[in-house]
Image (tube, rainbow, N blue to C red):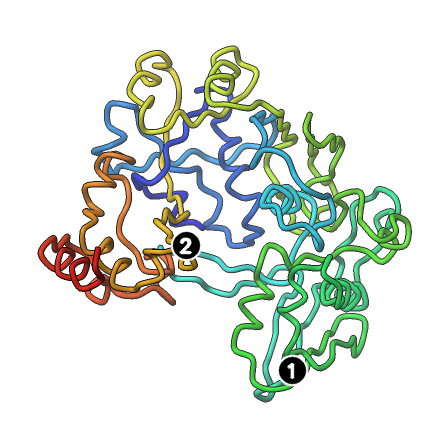
Amino acid sequence: MNYWQRKNLSRRRVLVGAGTIGAGALGVALVGCGDDDDDDDVAPATNTPETAAASPTVVQDPPKRGGTFASYNLNATVDSLDIQQSTHPGTQAYSQFTNDGLTMLDERTPGDFQQKPQLAESWEQPDATTIILKIRKGVKYANVAPANGREMTAQDVVFSLKRMATDDAKFPRRTWFKQVDSIEATDANTVRIKTKQPYAALMYLLGSPWMVVISPEQAAQDGAVLKNLVGTGPYIAKKLEVGTEFVFERNPDYWDAGKPYLDRFQFLNIQGVAAQLAAFRAGQTHYADPGADLIEKFRSENPSAREWTGPRVGIGILAFNGKKAPFTDPRVRQAIANAVDLKGWMDVLVKGDGQQTGPMYAGYKTWALAQDKLLYTKPDIQKAKQLLNAAGQ
């Protein structure tokens, strides 16, 4: 996470009002981190529009407490406020304000994911099928109903994991637990997970932002579907009106002392780039993402805006319906792959702001294919024609 705060990478352009969000940008970066290292306390890289594309210079502002960050909605609306049943990225993004996970995957350098403590302050694997988590002491739920600020325990972790593993189609990540044999609290601050066989993915899954701790009281109060976002996280949900407005305020009892920095987040349901840019110009929000096509115009119209860049880890694909002719023939699919000029596409569609990948985004170095292992890196029209002729096309 720190790497992305400090380096200027031409993957995603963001603009915020100068003087409004200077320290607030740090708060934004830290909300999803939960990192407790002192060297996290630096502001994101900032440059003037004239030098942002060319200069690697990093300007570090000291962290400051306070202020409100207003933005348009994260990932439009959400499908549910039940983080364990939702499949919507918006629900996951919002839940990171209010709910902590057991661990997190910290990306100190691009693609280099390190497992770091969050609610689980340490862990060990005494054998190939056992994980023992030591749960952080003194962590409290937000001081709102129904948990009312009580201390979180290992039993709460067990409850959360078991609910997530419920064998019901309403719990989409239940398959993550198919190889889990048992989950139990051996004391107030220790959770032991036993698997049916060695399960290498489990520690990574425990670091997923979907894997958060809820409270049994909320499940009992709300019934089959959770109706609120309540947890041990850095913020308390003050307003959750799906399709209208979400507001989060700083949790004064947060376990990570001194954090978060920002006092308040407000997310408004503003649809469409034009309306979002208008809200930014009017001072209604502090964030805008004009996109590659409008970036130069936006710079000229907003000379006092502060700009920085960061990675966009989504993948764009061209997919075939393999159930319909002629795509049922693999030679046709291979011909199209050979004919496509991927670099040309990126130059036109995203102003060259991207790179070819395999099925896994290239930045994820732990899993991604090396560039020299990728197929179809250069168009081969002759081979494409041969394949189409062989397929009778």
Is the C terminus in the top left, top right, bottom left or bottom right quadrant? bottom left
Q: Is residue 352 above or below residue 268?
A: below
Identify the amino acid type marked 2.
Asn
Occupied quadrant, residue 195: bottom right
For marks 1 and 2, give the one nearer the viewer.
2
* Residue at the (76%, 32%) spot, across then down: 238
Query: In this figure, which residue is indicated by the disc labeled 1?
Result: 195
Q: Position of residue 346 (x, y in %)?
A: 25, 41
* Residue at the (39%, 44%) spot, across then down: 312
Q: Is residue 354 above or below residue 139?
A: above
- Left or right: 43 in relation to 196: left
Query: In this figure, which residue is indicated by the disc labeled 2?
Result: 321
Q: Position of residue 308 (x, y in %)?
A: 37, 32
| Residue, far left | 382
Q: Position of residue 383 (x, y in %)?
A: 12, 60
Occupied quadrant, residue 328: bottom left
